[in-house]
Amino acid sequence: MKYFQFFFLCLLLNFSCTSNHKNQLPLKEISEYFPKEKAQVLVVGTFHFDYPGLDAHKTSSEDKIDVLKEPKKSEVTQLVNYIKKFKPNKIAIEAFENWNATEKFRSYKSGEYQNNRDERFQLAMRIASELKLDTLYSIDTETMAGDLEKIDSSYAQALFKDFDFQSDDIYENYYRDQREAEDKAIPKMNLLDYFKYINSKEYHQYDYGAYLIGDFKLGDSRGADIISSWWYNRNLRIFRKLQLITENANDRILLVFGNGHASVLRQVIEASPEYEFIEFDNL
């Protein structure tokens, strides 16, 4: 009996010490040191509706869809209506400043460009028009790698030697199979369902991983230097432009970008104390 009394006394003392220790911690949860009010950002990662063929992966002609013809035309409307639930007060797109987005947007509202398949027209401008916004922000940017080439072209050429997405890395084959499967699925799949699929956290993690294989392994660190000065740097600069168009914590900003960008933008937006990343599937 005395043994059990001693045992329970020890347990009680241990619980008491642990409880007191927790109550006496001098620090709050780290999130409590920062404002709870944050500007909200919805990143809509997309494929390029007009298939410009500028990305490393090229979609075969038989797998391309036409967003101006049924059933995809109606599916675009469904997708637009879904995104509008976010009620953005600002929309930013994958375009350089010299693309003159707001000028094109004014022309769009007058009836021009409405049959242009580009997602900047079919999604961003259409949403901006229907929500009666008056500005479209172009926040794409050149990269540090481009700056380096202007300073020392011979160094840049040596740095980027053999960087061509043609690696024999076995993981490249896995990604190739995955992309080809997607190309064949898009014509059969509802666009909203597809966008929920490609904008999930898991998808973005794997999409981010596509830049950490293959040519990333060039040399000891040359591939890492390429990715950091080219792709990662480009997206950090895009994020900086996002900061420049953010005015206050009441902003609700929609970004329409190629989905390769979305994986990196998700990472930095989620980490930033200024923003709340809105999950596409939670609208």
Image: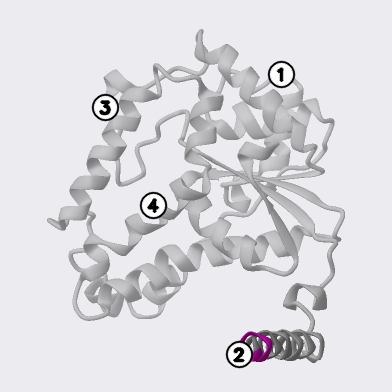
- At label 3, counting other C-alpha atoms closer than 10 Å, the crowd grade (few under 14, some 14-19, many 20 or more) is few
Residue 228: percent from the left, percent from the top? 41, 72
The answer to whether residue 195 is left or right of residue 229 is: right
Query: The residue under label 1 is which amino acid type?
Result: Gly
Of residues 79 and 256, which is closer to you in this image? 79
Colour basis: one colour
What stretch of residues is rendered in magenta?
2-6
CA–CA distance between discs 1 and 2? 88 Å
- Chain-order first, disc 2 or disc 4: 2
Identity of the residue drawn at 31% across and 24% down: 184
Find the distance from the CA under tag 2 to the CA under tag 3.
Answer: 78 Å
Q: How many marks?
A: 4
Residue bearing mark 3: 60
Quickly name the residue at label 4.
Answer: 206
Q: Which mark is residue 3?
A: 2
Q: Quadrant of residue 74?
A: top right
User: Against 204, is 197 above or below?
Assistant: above
Report which quarter residue 6 is drawn in. Answer: bottom right
Circle 1: element type: loop
Amino acid tagged 3: Ser
Mark 3 or mark 4, whichever is nearer to me: 4
Comparing marks 2 and 3, which lies closer to the viewer?
Answer: 2
For residue 111, the mark is 1
Q: Amino acid at mark 2?
A: Tyr
Task: Give the quadrant of residue 218.
Answer: bottom left
Residue at point 52%, 26% (across, down): 193
The secondary element bearing badge 3 is classed as loop
The answer to whether residue 129 is seen in the rendering is yes
Q: Assess disc 1: are there few (<14), some (14-19) or many (≥20) residues with their C-alpha within 10 Å of its C-alpha.
A: few
Secondary structure at badge 4 equals helix
**Earlier-in-chain disc, 3 versus 1:** 3
